[in-house]
Image (cartoon, coloured by chain):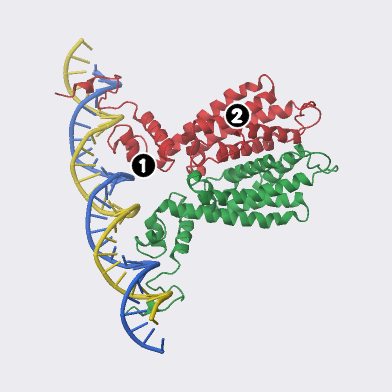
Chain colours: A red, B green, C yellow, D blue
DNA sequence: TGTACATCAGTGAACGCGCGTTCACTGATGTAC
DNA sequence: TGTACATCAGTGAACGCGCGTTCACTGATGTAC
């Protein structure tokens, strides 16, 4: 009996002395545990246990628990950016339709990825001290900013409100709706409609206020 | 030496065997500690230590740490409601002016009372399981709802958008701006303007979209 | 192709620490008479 | 006004537990020749 299984790799659950993907597994562990018990409901040792590894092993990959959380948040922003890019789809078929999709994608991310979402926005990570994290967040916001620019550029007549402001307003509105009503955990508040409907209506009213959208007459 | 000071009450820092205001002091301790280290950065024992009391003492007032947090959140909502009521001032001198004050009060609360704010919105307290907390939150939101109704009622012409929707939109926008840009801690994001300006502009654009406000010609 | 060696990524035992919680207790307060 | 007693709100010691972190170590992998 000299640990035969250790010499096999890639089998169903079989382990070698070297885990091989521990870093990835720690991230997955963190996500599972955040989803289960909130962004502060788990420890470094918990993550190690979840990954089936000794409590000292995570130190090979992260200096401490906060570094792991920051990495989770960074990866979250990267996925978020990709989700937003897919939804925006370069403004097809027209900027307004694509813009509404962007809002829905925001809510969908908050609901389907509550673990990433809370790591990104509610884990209390000081963004100022973490340039990589900040950049990942900025890139995600940038999708919104580019979309806002296109909306403004496509506007009829001489209406050219500042695109940055538009993007910030939509971000804040989406974030507010998501945080209050569309979150994937027990702190979600009840609402007499779907969060998507609420957000879409809000965005349309807002765009109408900017003169970038007109409701159809016959409604 | 038979603990003379114990027999005095109300003096500067002097203590009797019975603390007298421990419950209030525990709440204050929680607020101090949340402000310092975040909503999860302290323990029941910390709160006891801060209040200058043995670690078993808090159990006379709260069943556990979560109960203390929930009480902090509840008190936060009560203060929030009062702050909003003061800002609204029954719609004086006119509903629109008062409504803008309401938005500023939201941001001011988030900035000046980050401890209450994070207990209320970011401590992960399951609101469904806590009727008192939920009611306190509902009462705070109700201020916004009543204000929205007055705004709608005072609207010119036949424009009568649903007040509940208006209130929810403004709540979400305020909450988004506050959570992202006006929070009182290190997770605050940078912004090329003041959060107040951003929110006020957003509210005005939104109200314009509803036909409840018109920008002055000469701007 | 084989061998020696450096490097890497894990182990597991150990430590000091502080937390949550309980317990029998005790000082202070309120009340009945 | 005084006294006896019940009740309340604290004490402080104790416990088991799990965490964070370190350490010397060891199995596995990669590479030079």
A97 with respect to B73 (left or right): right
Which residue is under mark 1? A43
Front-most of residues A195 and C1: A195
Residue visible at 67% across and 24% down in the picture: A97
Q: Residue furthest right?
A: B218
Q: Nearer the viewer, mark 1 or mark 2?
A: 2
Q: Secondary structure at mark 1?
A: loop
Which chain is home to disc 2?
Answer: A
Which residue is under mark 2? A104
- Give x and y (percent) for residue B79: 58, 57
Q: Is residue A25 above or below residue D4?
A: above
Is residue A30 something that shows in the picture? yes
Q: Tell me the distance, in whole angstroms, between the alpha carbons under discs 1 and 2.
A: 33 Å
Residue visible at 61% across and 21% down in the picture: A89
User: Crowding near pointer 1: few (<14 within 10 Å), some, many (20+)?
Assistant: some
> In what quadrant of the picture does the C terminus of chain A appear?
top right
Task: Give the numbered dot on residue B67.
Answer: none
- Give x and y (percent) for residue A208: 75, 33
Front-most of residues B177 and A145: B177
A217 with respect to B127 (left or right): right
Q: Is residue B39 above or below residue A64?
A: below
Is residue B125 something that shows in the picture? no
> In what quadrant of the picture does the N terminus of chain A appear?
top left
- Give x and y (percent) for residue A42: 38, 41
A82 with respect to B86 (left or right): left
């Amino acid at each position: 009996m000299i640990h035969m299984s250790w010499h096999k790799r890639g089998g169903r659950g079989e382990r070698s002395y070297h885990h091989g993907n521990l870093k990835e597994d720690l991230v997955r562990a963190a996500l599972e545990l955040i989803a289960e018990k909130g962004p502060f409901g788990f420890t470094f040792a918990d993550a190690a246990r979840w990954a089936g590894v000794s409590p000292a092993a995570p130190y090979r990959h992260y200096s401490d628990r906060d570094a792991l959380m920051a990495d989770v948040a960074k990866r979250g922003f990267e996925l978020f950016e990709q989700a937003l890019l897919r939804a925006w789809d370069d403004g097809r078929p027209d900027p307004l339709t694509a813009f509404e999709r962007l809002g829905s994608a925001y809510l969908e991310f908050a609901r389907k990825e509550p673990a990433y979402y809370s790591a990104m926005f509610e884990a209390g990570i000081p963004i100022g001290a973490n340039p990589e994290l900040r950049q990942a967040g900025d890139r995600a916001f940038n999708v919104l900013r580019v979309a806002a620019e296109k909306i403004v550029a496509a506007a009829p007549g001489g209406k050219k409100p500042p695109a940055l402001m538009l993007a910030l307003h939509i971000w804040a509105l989406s974030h507010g709706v998501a945080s209050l009503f569309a979150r994937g955990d027990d702190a979600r508040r009840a609402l007499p409609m779907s969060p998507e409907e609420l957000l879409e209506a809000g965005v349309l009213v807002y765009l109408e206020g900017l003169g970038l959208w007109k409701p159809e007459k016959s409604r």
